[in-house]
Image: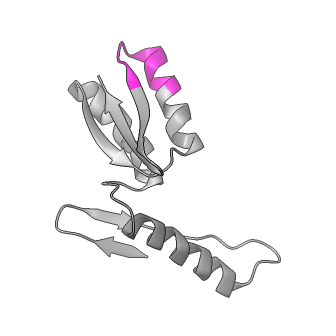
Amino acid sequence: MKLDFEEGIEIVSGFGAFGISAENVAKNACKAANRYLNSEAVVGPYLADQLLLPMAIAGGGQFTALRPSRHLKTNIEVIQRFLDVKITLEEIKPGLWLVNVG
């Protein structure tokens, strides 16, 4: 599912698995889209991890995101091992996190 905004695009997807109906896959993707749409987050949880490296190389920045994913936390650790940059996560409201790079 593609969510178009003036400032960017957010993609929400779901993947099937043995024993899970197509309806449940779609229902889960719609729930994820609604969580994002009903939040104040600038980016969804799976775009957040992809933004870290360009921001670290560029010298820093910050954005808000939904609950940090395991990918986001892992990328923070990996980037900090290779680059001299501090990346922090701070929950500023329930379910809304500030990601600060630099």
On-image quarter of the C terminus: top left
Say which of 53 and 96 sits in front: 96
User: Residue drawn at (56%, 33%), measured in percent from left and top?
Assistant: 74
User: Residue drawn at (51%, 44%), measured in percent from left and top?
Assistant: 68
Question: Which x, y percent locates residue 56?
Answer: 31, 27
Extreme residue toward the left, this view: 6
Q: Which residues are magenta?
A: 77-87
Question: Which x, y percent locates residue 80?
Answer: 44, 19
Q: Using the rendered view, name the quadrant where residue 37 is placed.
A: bottom left
Left or right: residue 73 versus residue 39 is right
Left or right: residue 53 versus residue 80 is left
Extreme residue toward the top, this view: 84
Say which of 99 and 3 sits in front: 99
User: Residue drawn at (42%, 64%), measured in percent from left and top?
Assistant: 36
Question: Which x, y percent locates residue 63?
Answer: 29, 43
Q: Using the rendered view, name the quadrant where residue 31 is placed.
A: bottom right
Extreme residue toward the right, this view: 19
